[in-house]
Image (tube, rainbow, N blue to C red):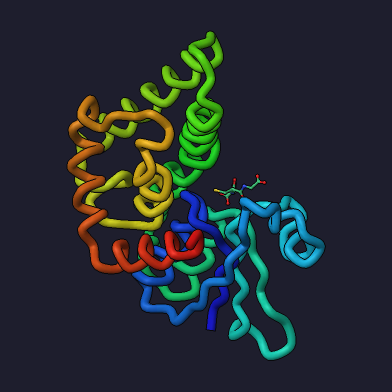
């Protein structure tokens, strides 16, 4: 049984989507970010970086649980555990890692910065304009990839799609309009319609109720 320590957030939903897609039994443990629970001693013992999600796999070994943070690392762990959503041949696998690293180093930080500007409801500023431009640049890069093939890393749905989708599903929260990125919109709508994805979104959002 897997435990996913999470809240109703873009990075959390990625781990839940992966567990749903892979048919892995899991329970969600809420970490209420509104109350600062990510900084509690108990949570910091799981992830000294103080951020959700954290995965605990109690079935991995008889004597030691696997405890993992960083959503991309969790996606890779679950894919390797199940042999799903991560190709094994070097070229296709490399393309998945290319997208995972692009997500973690460029897309996720860009979306987070723009989200923080939106949250603070700041007046227009150079920083806010720059954050919006970076979001548009990143979405433009993704749109180009998605014009060339159906999924972000090629012809098949992989954990790289789950990584990007986790944030892009919340595009309104960081002020993006997918109408300007038709291939991202086509891909987003297809992934949103997957039953595993709707189930994961529902259970992740319920953490904030
Ligand atoms: N690189 C991390 C980022 C995790 C992250 O930023 N989580 C946010 C929620 S989406 C969080 O826990 N924020 C609470 C805080 O920063 O105090 C990942 O991909 O898992």
Give the residue drawn at x 43%, y 71%: 19
Judged left or right of residue 33, residue 76 is left
Residue at x 36%, y 23% (from the top left corner): 136
Left or right of residue 111, residue 51 in this image: right
Asked if residue 94 is positioned above or below residue 135 in the image, the reply reads: below
Task: Decide which of 38, 87 is in the foreground and name it.
Answer: 38
Residue 135: image location, x then y, percent = 42, 26
Asked if residue 132 lies left or right of residue 122, the reply is left
Relative horizontal placement of residue 54, taking residue 107 as reference (left or right): right
Measured as percent of width and height from the top left, residue 75 is found at 49, 60
Q: Compare residues 158 and 187 and report the one nearer the observer.
A: 187
Going 46% across and 46% down the picture, which residue do you hit?
100
Comparing 105 with 134, the one in front is 134
Q: Residue furthest front?
A: 209
Q: Is residue 106 visible?
A: no
Q: Which quadrant of the view contains residue 93?
A: bottom left
Residue, far bottom: 62
Residue 71 in the image: state x and y as whole percent: 54, 55
Q: Is residue 156 above or below residue 181?
A: below
At a point 41% along the width and 37% down the height, the residue shown is: 173
Above-or-below relation of 117 to 29: above
């Amino acid at each position: 049984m897997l435990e996913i320590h999470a809240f109703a957030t873009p990075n959390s939903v990625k781990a839940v989507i992966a567990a749903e897609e892979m048919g892995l039994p899991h329970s969600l443990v809420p970490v209420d970010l509104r109350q600062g629970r990510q900084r509690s001693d108990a949570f910091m013992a799981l992830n000294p970086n103080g951020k959700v999600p954290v995965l605990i796999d109690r079935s991995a070994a008889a004597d030691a649980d696997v405890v993992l943070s960083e959503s991309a690392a969790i996606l890779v762990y679950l894919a390797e555990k199940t042999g799903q959503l991560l190709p094994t041949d070097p070229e296709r696998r490399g393309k998945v890692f290319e997208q995972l690293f692009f997500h973690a180093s460029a897309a996720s930080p860009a979306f987070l910065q723009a989200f923080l500007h939106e949250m603070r409801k700041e007046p227009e500023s150079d920083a806010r304009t720059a954050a919006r431009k970076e979001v548009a640049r990143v979405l433009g890069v993704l749109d180009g990839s998605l014009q060339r093939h159906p999924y972000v890393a090629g012809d098949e749905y992989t954990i790289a799609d789950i990584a990007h989708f986790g944030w892009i599903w919340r595009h309104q929260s960081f002020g993006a309009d997918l109408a300007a990125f038709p291939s991202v919109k086509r891909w987003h709508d297809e992934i949103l319609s997957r039953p595993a994805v709707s189930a994961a979104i529902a259970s992740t959002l319920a953490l904030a109720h």
